[in-house]
Image (spheres, rainbow, N blue to C red):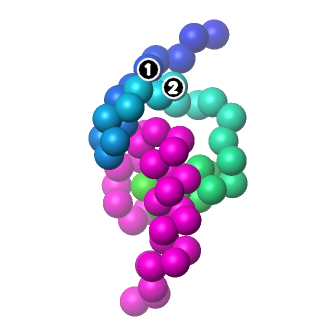
């Protein structure tokens, strides 16, 4: 089963959605869906980075 290749809207790299994810990538995908409304448009590396940065800098309102 082949997956469609997409281009990340943050870094511009090509990626294949739906491949195996780390816990940080899963957290980044949740953040993309719940906070930034850009789910499905970020590569695994940007999702990973987003989750790690959110742990450090995102505070509760």
Locate the N terminus by quadrant. Answer: top right
Number of residues whose C-alpha sits closer than 10 Å to that of mark 2, classed few (under 14), some (14–19) or many (20 or more) = some
Is residue 56 magenta-colored? yes
Q: Say whether residue 57 is visible.
A: yes
Locate the C terminus by quadrant. Answer: bottom left
Magenta stretch, main secondary structure, is: helix
The x and y percentages for residue 43 are 46, 39
Q: Quadrant of residue 41?
A: top left
Furthest toward the top, the residue is 1
What span is in magenta? 34-61
The x and y percentages for residue 31 are 47, 61
Q: Say whether residue 30 is visible.
A: no
> Could you tell which of marks 2 and 1 lies nearer the N-terminus?
1
Horizontal side of 21 relative to 55 (left or right) equals right
Furthest toward the bottom, the residue is 61
The x and y percentages for residue 11 are 34, 42
Q: Which mark is residue 16?
A: 2
Residue visible at 45% across and 79% down in the picture? 57
Instruction: Using the numbered discs, state the Cα–Cα distance from disc 2 to disc 1 in whole angstroms.
Output: 5 Å
Query: Which residue is nearer to you in this view: 43 or 41?
Result: 43
Position above or below: 35 against 58: above
Horizontal side of 48 relative to 43 (left or right) equals right
Label 2 close to label 1 by CB (< 8 Å): yes
Residue visible at 39% across and 65% down in the picture? 35
Residue visible at 48% across and 68% down in the picture? 53
Q: Secondary structure at mark 2?
A: loop
Is residue 46 magenta-colored? yes
Label 1 sits on residue: 5
């Amino acid at each position: 089963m082949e997956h469609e290749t997409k281009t990340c809207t943050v870094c511009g790299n090509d990626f294949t959605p739906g491949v195996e994810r780390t816990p940080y990538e899963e957290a980044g995908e949740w953040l993309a869906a719940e906070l930034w409304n850009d789910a499905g448009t970020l590569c695994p590396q940007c999702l990973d980075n987003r989750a790690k940065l959110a742990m450090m800098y995102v505070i509760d309102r």
